[in-house]
Image (cartoon, rainbow, N blue to C red):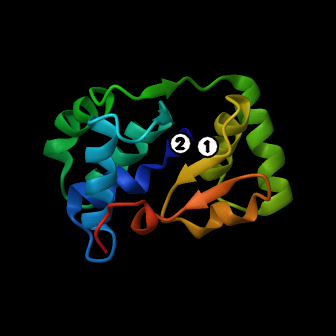
Amino acid sequence: MVEFYIDSNVFFYARIMDRSYGRSCANVVRRVASKQLDASTSVLVPIEVANAMSKYGLAKDVPTEIHAIVSLGLEIYPIEAADASEAAEFFRETGVSPYDCLHASVIRKNGLKDIVSADKDFDKFEWLRRTDPRSIPGTPH
């Protein structure tokens, strides 16, 4: 089974029930929770979700959301200094957000090749396969 790295926008769009991605992202999260989807993420993701929620006016819900993400049972990879150095190189090569470059670094370090994300910038990494949350089998559009 393919192990998917789950990007922060999947959790955020599921939380706010985004018009375009909310239902499919919520289904991805349910599939992760029920072990129907082999998934991992990094420690950066819950913090990115918390930041997005704070900006969206949901600061009071941040602790609950972080707890929910870390309680899903998916592998949560740490971030190390070497990851930041590699992310800087990815940034130089691609011009993609430094946060996304850090995700790419963690993905590569852990031998992964697949990410579930609505963010098309991940398509700029030739070695990385991005799957749109709406195209995960069984997810509503």
| Residue 114 position in % (x across, y down) | 61, 48
Which residue is identified by label 2? 5
- Nearer the viewer's eye, disc 2 or disc 1? 2
Residue appearing at x 78%, y 44% in the figure: 88
**Horizontal side, residue 3 vs residue 30: left or right:** right
| Residue 67 position in % (x across, y down) | 24, 29
Which residue is identified by label 1? 103
Q: Which quarter of the figure is the N terminus placed in?
A: top right
Determine if residue 55 is in view: no
| Residue 125 position in % (x across, y down) | 75, 58
Residue appearing at x 57%, y 41% in the figure: 2
**Horizontal side, residue 139 vs residue 85: left or right:** left
| Residue 111 position in % (x across, y down) | 71, 32
* Foreground pick, 51 / 116: 116
Residue appearing at x 53%, y 43% in the figure: 4
Determine if residue 94 is in view: yes
As drawn, 123 above or below 26:
below
Tags 2 and 1 touching, CB below 8 Å: yes
